[in-house]
Amino acid sequence: MYMTTMYSKELLKGTLTTIILKLLAHNEKMYGYEITQRVKLLSEGKILLKEGSLYPALHKLKNEGLVDTEKEMVDNRMRKYYYLTEKGNASTLEKVNELNQFIATLQHILITKPQTS
Amino acid sequence: MYMTTMYSKELLKGTLTTIILKLLAHNEKMYGYEITQRVKLLSEGKILLKEGSLYPALHKLKNEGLVDTEKEMVDNRMRKYYYLTEKGNASTLEKVNELNQFIATLQHILITKPQTS
DNA sequence: CAAATATACATAGAAAAACTATGTATGCAA
DNA sequence: TTGCATACATAGTTTTTCTATGTATATTTG
């Protein structure tokens, strides 16, 4: 058995919405719990999305018109599926692009000049 | 003349402290205004660090014992130089490492499965 | 069979981080 | 003399994620 160290939670700030949108772009419809599990899987247990973070984020996306929902009963349990609207699709492209550029800039700052050896 | 689009400010959250520490690791001592200019330069104008973000962040680093300061007068203007303590040096290594891993995870999420072509 | 864990949603209130706006002050250029 | 660049500082706001809690059903485990 091994320990996966979680990232400090602050790192997620500003990137969570983009992550959610990107997952929806892949899967055309996902429900909340599924998203938490997918993120956990993709991050190898290092990003553990909490309900208190996820659901408000999803509700906000819906208010902004980037996603829409449909409810379904599976095994007597309610599932609320989220899917991208056309607006959401466009927004995803923009946000993923911006995040990629930000990452490139970050790496530029983190890598340059590793001090006189 | 050209416009550089700034990143949405949320992206910086969680990474600012690490950026500051990394710059200090390169330069052994820097003052606040210098840090804002360096970040602007390294990010090609896409990260514009505000005083309201920088100075509280620096004060916090000092309270935590990761940096120490010395004042100097240059051209009749006060400069407060910040430099890493030993503790700050160790912390920088950890934080840069964590950020690099987080970036790798993010890219993994952002890149995988670009939808059935 | 009871208790714990997993599935599935939701929200109120706290904490953290960066921001806006403002203040002080000097030096230089238009 | 007006504005811009340099140089620091902080009060208060906004945003985001978190913790904690609540409801409810299904499954696994002791």
Image: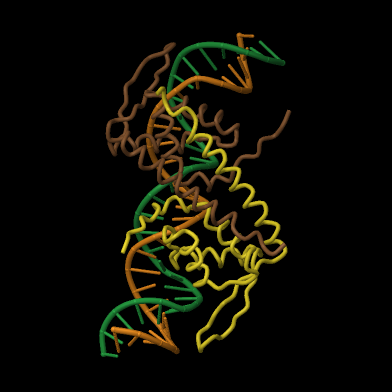
Chain colours: A brown, B yellow, C orange, D green
Quarter that holds the C terminus of chain A: bottom right
Say which residue appears at 40% left-offset and 38% top-offset.
Answer: A57
Q: Is residue B103 above or below residue B64?
A: above
Residue drawn at 67 percent across, 56 percent down:
B91
Q: Report the front residue among B37 and B16.
A: B37
Q: Is residue C16 left or right of residue C26?
A: right
Report the residue at 50% width, 61% height from top.
B42
User: Could you say where residue D10 lies in the image, as x and y percent from the top left?
Assistant: 46, 71
Nearer-the-camera pick, A34 or A42: A42
Residue A37 versus residue B106 in the image, above or below? above
The answer to which image quadrant residue A9 occupies is: top right
Residue C6, image quadrant: top right
Res B46 quadrant in image: bottom left
- For this orientation, the residue located farthest to the front is B1
x%, y% of residue A81? 37, 23
Q: Is residue A30 above or below residue B67?
A: above
User: Which residue is at the front of the view, D24 or B91?
Assistant: B91
